[in-house]
Amino acid sequence: MTSPWPPWRDPAHTSGLGSRAAGIARAIALEPRFVIADEPVSALDVSIQAQVLNLLEELQQALGLTFLVIAHDLAVVRHVSDVVAVMYLGGIVEQAPSDDLYAEPLHPYTKALMSSVPVPDPVVEATRERILLTGDLPSPSNPPSGCRFHTRCPFAQETRCDTERPALREVRPGHTVACHYAEEILAGTVTTRTVTPEQAADA
Ligand code: SF4
């Protein structure tokens, strides 16, 4: 027996989806090719989240839709995304295919975000590095000079970071990062609060 289509016509499928399914139905009623889903599973319990995400995936495959999903839950983002863009104070600081970004985040802000997510393996969880951000989130209407993340970045250096806004540039194929020191952080020559020999000589 085949399932009814669209999926929300099947009571078993939509049980518990409530207004979220109705919102999705309204969004695709005009047969768009591109849909922006802003926090599509926020404030839902985990089982309902899974139903909504499965529904979005079914719609994407059946209708050939492209979704732009805006979300703060990193597990949700990973589950639904082919490509992820990380934003800080209104600007993209890193963009990469989802697998690349989750395997090795390159921007300090993304590193801090990823390090805050618990790992289900207790051995890994006990040994992995956590990057804690200090300071308050600055106002987006009056962002810091230079790199907008420099007031909270544990890798911030004494030159450039507070004066020159880093461009989003390709550091690996398909993986772009807005950080002056992305390569050095990746190589381990810039670590948290390290000043390079050149900067020390200039000081
Ligand atoms: S440019 Fe400087 S402050 Fe900005 S993310 Fe990179 S190291 Fe941190």
Image (cartoon, rainbow, N blue to C red):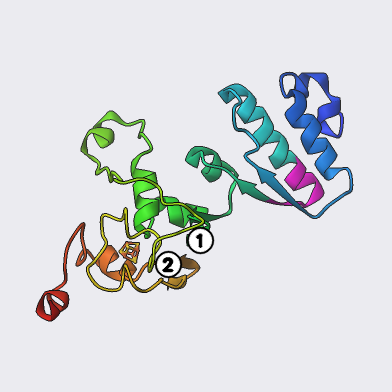
- The mark nearer the N terminus, 1 or 2, is 1
CA–CA distance in space, label 1 to label 2: 8 Å
Magenta-drawn segment: 59-67
Q: Examine the image and state in which quarter residue 4 appears.
A: top right
Q: Is residue 37 above or below residue 8?
A: below
Asked whether mark 2 lies closer than 8 Å to ligand 1, one says yes
Amino acid carrying label 1: it is Ile
Q: Say which residue appears at 51% left-offset and 61% top-offset.
A: 91
Q: Quadrant of residue 191?
A: bottom left
- Amino acid, disc 2: Ala
Q: Disc 1, disc 2: CB below 8 Å?
A: yes
Of residues 21 and 56, which is closer to you in this image?
21
Ligand 1 shown in quarter: bottom left
Residue denoted by label 2: 178
Residue 7 placement, left or right of 184:
right
Residue 3 shows in the view? no
Q: Which mark is residue 92?
A: 1
Q: In x, y percent, where is residue 65?
A: 76, 51
Which x, y percent locates residue 52? Answer: 68, 32
Q: Residue at x 78, y 35 (%)?
A: 23
Identify the mark at residue 138; answer none if there is no mark.
none
